[in-house]
Amino acid sequence: MPATVDYDAFTGMLKTAADRIITNRDHLSKLDAATGDGDHGTAMAKVANAIIATIDSHEGNDLKKLLKAIGWAAMSTDAGSTSPLYGSLFVGMSEAVPEGSGELDCQVLASVMESGAAKLRKNTKAEVGDKTMIDTLVPALAALRAAADSGKAIDEALSDAETAAATGAASTKDLKATFGRAKNLGDRSIGHLDPGATSMSLLFTGLKEGLAAN
Ligand SMILES: [Mg+2]
């Protein structure tokens, strides 16, 4: 496993993550139907298709420009609150990529993801425990940072992040929703996985699998 991921490897990871979402579209919408309006799979598939289309039409190998373009494409999708959340995630990621950089090492990858999360979190007041995507994102990035700081290789670091993401997503089942439509269900939201936490977990699985496939 090389110490860095280059443009082709990273876009392969993003495409695999997007494929994971598209494959699970119906599953995500079913989860959303239990506590919300049942459109989460459709919304996430729109973002996933925007990711793939942007990669396919992007010229050159500048990851900073690519991630910014993905962010704007995601923001321009008609996917409700999902559009600004994922749009800001990718624009935020772009901001932490060094100028003109065509590859990322594990430390930079962690910083890029943290920058994305920081920007995403400007669009939501949700914290860990509120039964949202934040329950997946925060522990996944903490695991990624810990792995990077301990000198782990990128594949190991992404594996740690995926495990933490899956645990975080699973934790939403026993939580009571305090955000979105699910909030209206109160205690009846308990016992259902949060769809946004689940799709975020699928993305981390896809990033890991996409790296392994390279
Ligand atoms: Mg919904």
Image (tube, rainbow, N blue to C red):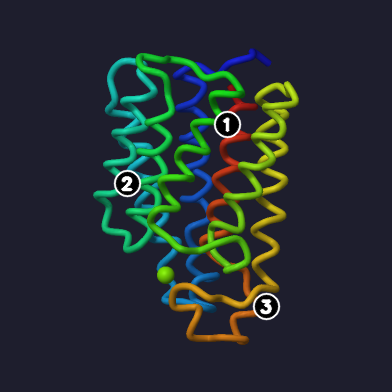
Asked whether 146 or 200 is in front, the reply is: 146
Q: Quadrant of residue 157?
A: top right
Left or right of residue 30, residue 170 in this image = right
Q: Residue 191 — which label?
A: 3
- Measure how far apart labels 2 and 3 are at the Cα level: 30 Å
User: Within 10 Å of the Cα at label 1, are there few (<14), some (14-19), or many (20+) other Cα atoms?
Assistant: many
Residue 9 position, x and y percent, is 51, 21
User: Within 10 Å of the Cα at label 2, are there few (<14), some (14-19), or many (20+) other Cα atoms?
Assistant: many
SS type, badge 1: helix
Q: Which of the four quarters of the rendered structure image does ligand 1 lie in?
A: bottom left
Left or right of residue 149, residue 35 in this image = left
- Figure quadrant of the C terminus: top right
Kind of residue at disc 3: Gly
Above/below status of 178 relative to 194: below
- Measure how far apart labels 3 and 1 are at the Cα level: 32 Å
Above/below status of 66 relative to 81: above
Kind of residue at disc 1: Ala
